Amino acid sequence: MADPLRIVLVSPRNPLNIGAVARAMSNFGFTDLRLVKPYDLAFREARSAVKSAYILQSAQVHESIAEAVAGCTLVAGTTAVGHRDLHVPLYRLETAGRLLREHAVTGQTALLFGSEKFGLSNEDMSFCHWLTRIPARPEHGSMNLGQAAAICLYELRRDESAAALPAFSPPEAASAEEIDRLYMVLMELLTRSGYTQQSTSTSAELKLRRLINRLHIPEHDCEVLLGMLRQILWRVDNPSGE
Amino acid sequence: MADPLRIVLVSPRNPLNIGAVARAMSNFGFTDLRLVKPYDLAFREARSAVKSAYILQSAQVHESIAEAVAGCTLVAGTTAVGHRDLHVPLYRLETAGRLLREHAVTGQTALLFGSEKFGLSNEDMSFCHWLTRIPARPEHGSMNLGQAAAICLYELRRDESAAALPAFSPPEAASAEEIDRLYMVLMELLTRSGYTQQSTSTSAELKLRRLINRLHIPEHDCEVLLGMLRQILWRVDNPSGE
């Protein structure tokens, strides 16, 4: 089955950047890489393509954008420029990601990246239905090609519904009686060690109870802490004990 | 004013990766970079820090994680590993981004990245309140350090509300009478050129009208097309005309 998203690098100059794009593609599970007139044809050995040489090996080299995007029903370009008169719609990547995901369900899509030095030319852009921009600081200028590609592919794999759910289940909280046992031992220890005095003990009791409750101590940690405190209490009661 | 987010690289090996992290920080408007025991101290001249040498120049080098995260009230670590018993909560980056953004409003935050070769160690992770994972393919293994940092910083600058709005206002659509004028000229041209025959013209008319409506032609484009069609119609009427 053909990969629904094709990554097209137009006139890329540095094989290390091409390798970095391949690595990001492998990271996010894309495989269809196309190069239009690469500056250096020795890109297939790029060391930066860690664990993704298979993508460089099968990458197709084309003479024109038209050839590279043949069969695609949506062609989107990337640009670092926000102010130039672009003649085609420009979307922030947050929006573009959604549009690309939706289109990829039914049709072949191409995402174009221009050369490291000049980006996509006006002629290159005329092949695009729309353009997208990563919301980076305009003052800085363009991003590194490998990093820009990684961000675009991450956006395509992003899952907002997954954001709502932590991948982690919080540990079982200690019950009120377990917390109370901890409180009793700690209070005892504080009294024996002279931290709480008889005169202030009621307000001290309340403060300590509130402090312990704020900690939301997990059940297992509560047991461990109780063990520690009991041992310390024993030492306080047996200064020279064995 | 201190940058609310601190990027901490633990035992980074390759100065080019450190430079790439600095570039991504500058792209997304972060400035506070800390290095814990970098392998190569000659990182400040890394060529990969395009337009962001100022970040490498001011980067602080620390002997320990404790020193690097001093003053932070939230310490988050990054990991490529999803299955290892991590002992601390693990969130997908979509969730982690929200937690980091929320915390940065009130408190100093540190985001830790481990070395290119080994990632964060169990000891490194014990300094973290929680960990985050970029939702990449686990089969591939870890990402490039510069690319991983770029993705995390993008996630922090992401604006879901901006995703709802196109940065582009669609051009004014042509009005019904302008569309009708276009239809009339095209129909005339098709009849003169023999494309539509008298016998089938009613169904042809309907089809053409529906086709033109489906195009949602912008006002300006409608005028341009009308000019083209009128010129062609004139040529059809004047095969040898001047």
Image (tube, coloured by chain):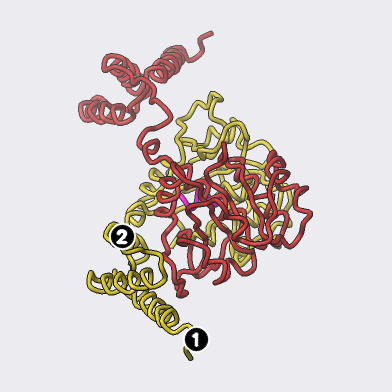
Chain colours: A yellow, B red
Q: Nearer the viewer, mark 1 or mark 2?
A: 2
Prevailing secondary structure class for the magenta stretch in the rendered image: helix
Query: Percent x, y for residue B222?
Result: 38, 19
Going 33% across and 59% down the picture, which residue do you hit? A211
- Mark 1 residue element: loop
* Residue A199: image tag: 2
- Foreground pick, A110 / A165: A165
Q: Answer left or right for B184 relative to A83.
A: left
Which residue, given by chain and number where applicable, does mark 1 sit on?
A240
Location of residue A129 with respect to A104 vertically, above or below: above
Q: Say which element carries label 2.
A: helix
Question: Which circle's residue, 1 or 2, is located before the other in the chain?
Answer: 2
Q: Position of residue B106 (x, y in %)?
A: 44, 43
Q: Residue furthest bottom?
A: A242
Image-based side of B22 in relation to B148, left or right: right
- At label 1, the amino acid type is Ser
Q: Which residues are magenta?
A: A149-155
